[in-house]
Image (cartoon, rainbow, N blue to C red):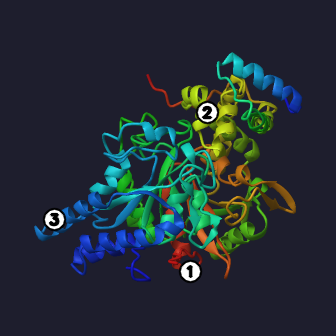
Amino acid sequence: MADPIDLEAYVDAAAELVGMPLDPAHRPGVVLNLGRIAQMAALVMEFPLPDDTEPAPVYQP
Amino acid sequence: MSTKPGAVVDALAASQAVRSGATSAIEITQTALAHIAARNPALNAFTAVTAERALAEADAIDRQRKRGETLGPLAGAPFAVKNLFDIKGLVTLAGSKIDAERPPAAADAFILRKLNDAGAILVGALNMDEYAYGFTTENTHYGAAHNPHDLAHVAGGSSGGSGAAVAGGLVPIALASDTNGSVRVPASFCGTFGLKPTYGRLSRAGTRPFVASLDHLGPLTRTVGDLAASYDAMQGADPNDPACAGRPVEPAFPILEHGASGLRIAVLGGHFAGSGIAAEAVATAAKALAATRKVEIPEAARGRAAAFVISASEGADLHFADLKSRAQDFDPMTRDRFLAGALIPAGWVLRAQRFRRWYREQVLALFREVDILLAPATPCPAPRIGQETIEIDGVAVPMRPFIGVYTQPLSFIGLPIVAAPLRQPGGLPIGVQIIAAPWREADALRVARALERGGVTNAEPALG
């Protein structure tokens, strides 16, 4: 996801999928920011978590 | 009570003066309102001043005193709140243009009411980054908040108005929120104390959320006494915030003078080592506390990354309807980040939430060996308004996302933290984070008080 060309294609497709049309003027900033988020996410995704690590939600039925 | 006529900079001292009859709540309120009118045009800290309400509250306090009733611990002390707190009768802006179309709030936020109950006087609402998504309060709709120590510099964010109002002597107490550092960053840049309590300690009911998983509320003040007294007054269970843990009230003020003795204090290395003025500030605090031990939090950079991903995703989801229909009405400073956050694959967010659990276990293990950790609050003192990059170890990095590098990995797991202000002669302030184990706010406050008493901290207001 680090390739900016891939990111542009992803942004266009994902924006269409979620029904959020992007103003062409906003698109470069969105691509830049999704690139930053992708770099952060890569740090999280590459870390091997044990299968029994569950999230810690506050939801209480 | 004040270092210069026209400023009320110590809430407990002001309150004591009201209790003793040396002054009245009305006089203090009028003094504060006059100082706000004189100084706010330069600072742009306030977005609304609630003069009529403030004078009515002050009048009620003075009547209580005349009737011989016991006054609250903060009776007559002025305070203001970040404009994401509901104030009855006012529209809650949360720094946005979009929310200006909402109806006025029907009731006050829970902890605002708590401070009122303690006798404090609400004088207004404070500037912030739009929807709390920023570290600089360079708000396009309402203007940038200016740093009282140098008006060309940012006040920090997202609670920049809170930092500027306290540092400028406009109010002795300002309430703020902290999702990734928004109490601690303005406290560091403006040279005030700030407290981000444990996640779930204070109710967030009646405030505009940003990231439900990570949102906290807390006060900024000029003294540790005011920090502890206001924190104590705001504690309490509240079923209207599902994340509020409902802990019993555990007052910190009565044990504030216990000092740092008996607490095992260590300096955070690794990710938090810092450089330059930030590292020097931590070294100064560590020396004063005789803390020689160094420890590391494993995978802190990943902790920051996970907080970054969760914030972008939850924040975007909260504003999704507006992002779809009226993106042009968002602040250009936040808009593209919010839009990008709406496009994040679900797996990234879920993994970040699971990582949070793992990371929490590592940090809790560390707290079996130590009681207090020290780290820089920000990588540098306040940058200039409009500045794009900052230099870290000789490398230029984008300024705005980098400001939270030391705050984000800690709020991510909800640790209680006091930001304590240090200052080099002639320089801008910078803060040190005093980090305690969950629910041990009092430990962090005791250490902050020991530094304050030892003359290590410097929260002198910039009165202009």
Contact (Cβ within 8 Å) of mark 1 with mark 2: no
Q: Is residue B284 above or below residue B380?
A: below
Q: Residue at x 56, y 74 (%)?
A: B451
Give amino acid for label 1.
Gly
Foreground pick, B123 / B16: B123
Q: Earlier in the sequence, mark 3 or mark 2?
A: 3
Q: Secondary structure at mark 1?
A: loop
For the residue marked with disc 3, what is the amino acid? Gln
Where is residue B157? Give x, y as percent.
Answer: 59, 55
* Image quarter of the N terminus of chain B: bottom left
What residue would you read off at disc 1?
A: B455
Q: Residues within 10 Å of mark 1 (few under 14, many from 20)?
A: few
Q: Residues within 10 Å of mark 2 (few under 14, many from 20)?
A: many
Quadrant position of residue B364: top right
Mark 3 or 2, closer to the camera: 2
Q: Residue at label 2? A: B327
Position of residue B76 measured from the top left corner of the image (x, y, whole percent): 29, 67
Q: Depth check: B358 or B46 in front?
A: B46
Question: Which residue is label 3 attached to?
Answer: B64
Residue drawn at point x = 77 percent, y = 23 percent = A12
Element at label 3: helix
Q: Is residue B324 left or right of residue B446?
A: right
